Image (cartoon, grey):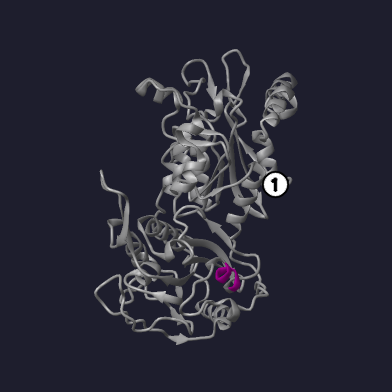
Amino acid sequence: MKRDDIRDLEAARGRLRDAARPDIVQRVHGTGKLTARERMRLLLDPTSEVEYGSIAARSAEGEWVPEAGGVDFVGTVDGRPVIASSTDYTDHGGGYGAGRLGRLFALAYEQRWPLVLFVDGGGSRARHPRSGMGHVETSGPIGRFSFLDGVPELSGWVPVVAIVSGPSFAGHASIAGFSDFLISTPGSSIGMGGPPMVEAALGHRLGPNELAGSEMHELAGGIDLLVEDEAAAVAAAKRYLSYYDNERDEGAAPDVDLDALAPDADASCDMHGIVRAVCDADSVFELRPRFAPALLTCLARVGGRSVGVLANQPLVDDGAIDHNAATKIARFVELCDAYEYPMVALIDTPGCVANWDLKGQPPAVEPGLTRWHARPLVAHQQRTVPLVSVQVRRGRGLGPALMTGVSTTRGVPALRLGWPGVEIGRRDGYSAVVDHNAFDDVIAPRETRERIARLLGLLGRPTARVRKKHPIDTW
């Protein structure tokens, strides 16, 4: 082989490195962000990475054509294989040719490797090299998936994390919306149509963040977590993936007097403290904290075992379950069931409420149901992971059913516990029935964590699956 050919190839690859473009690196750092390759170095374990698709093609003149728009790697995160990809907004606006992602989606499907995707950019672009036109492509579409159907197919099969730390529109926003766990940073934006498209249609110019800001998505449930910067986003992605690793040693119990923390029958308390006291020390990771805050959804560990925790928050709207909280429950149940996380439900709610915002009338909240309240019941009906319920205080109307599933179905809790302040047989002002709470035991709050940990140990680990159960709902 001619040494000139090797030198030319190495030179083309070298032009992709940050060291070859110091002016661009300086500009990126000036905005407080990382380059695409710096993102990958921060995410992946050192010396673990294998790069895919750095060279896109060779021209008819014999020149190597570097890929544009982003970088793709397979490597490890905390020792576990992960596929990692980052768009590069400084290179063709972060627009992928899209061939490589389909290839990596297929690899993720075959190997059941999680994905972490930085997706800031304006959507995919037409690929410049074309077969049959004097070019030779090296990274065209390969495998079973295209740019957009890969992530929906992976939904519920492997964890897919998307990070948005800039403007993300069109195809990039679609990938973000299809993901299991979406992290963003302040000032970023996620939308299907960018400012030029909106201006062309409406004649009004809006900035990306004005049009589809992540701060708005945080309140509306469009993202799972808003963090301060890209380093914090990478840390959150790593923490999310850590729960997928269910081979941990037994976790330490928190140093909390749960008997003292538990509320009396006529008082309420911050459910965050209850969740932290029931789970292993420093293991609680809350998702969507500012969306439907009357309902907490957390990944955590109990006795070293990854679990999903649902908890009513009586300090917000008395812990009532409106349509947003119901939607939050349903998606979280789907996520936990797909990835075999047993569930813990901490119940303290007056029941379900409906929000009415009729034209010409002031908004109203009153006891009632909407079609969204059916979604948790459907999610629990297909759930096969075990669930332990703990009624902290109140559990009126259909509230407990939305938290645990209907008690006569296959989704019945594996263990139903109550605390001494629990309501039993009291008339429910939110419906025309009298509650008939049935418990396997009423216990002192301090016994809760040990009871749950022992039961999870007896239930054992799930068997390996050869196909996914179901997808996880999008936005």
Observer-nearest residue: 264 or 253? 264
Locate the N terminus by quadrant.
top right
**Residue pictured at 57% horizontal, 73% vertical:** 278
Q: Is residue 199 above or below residue 256?
A: above
What range of the chain is rendered magenta? 273-277
Give the side of residue 204 with respect to residue 242, left or right.
Answer: left
* Other-residue count near label 1 (Cα within 10 Å), few / some / many at <14 / 14–19 / ≥20: some
Q: Is residue 201 above or below residue 231?
A: above
- Name the outermost residue toward the top: 61
Give the side of residue 253 with respect to residue 327, left or right.
Answer: right
Magenta span includes 35: no
Give the side of residue 110 with respect to residue 53, left or right.
Answer: left
**Residue pictured at 46% horizontal, 35% vertical:** 212
Dividing the picture into quadrants, the one containing residue 73 is top right
Percent from the top left, x then y, of residue 308?
A: 50, 65
Q: Which residue is mark 1?
A: 48
Percent from the top left, x then y, of residue 70?
A: 59, 32
Dividing the picture into quadrants, the one containing residue 371 is bottom left
Q: Secondary structure at mark 1?
A: loop
Note whether residue 448 is visible.
yes
Percent from the top left, x then y, of residue 467?
A: 42, 58
Note whether residue 1 is visible.
no
**Residue pictured at 53% horizontal, 68% vertical:** 271
Observer-nearest residue: 135 or 379? 379
Percent from the top left, x then y, of residue 170?
A: 44, 32
Residue type pointed to by label 1 = Ser
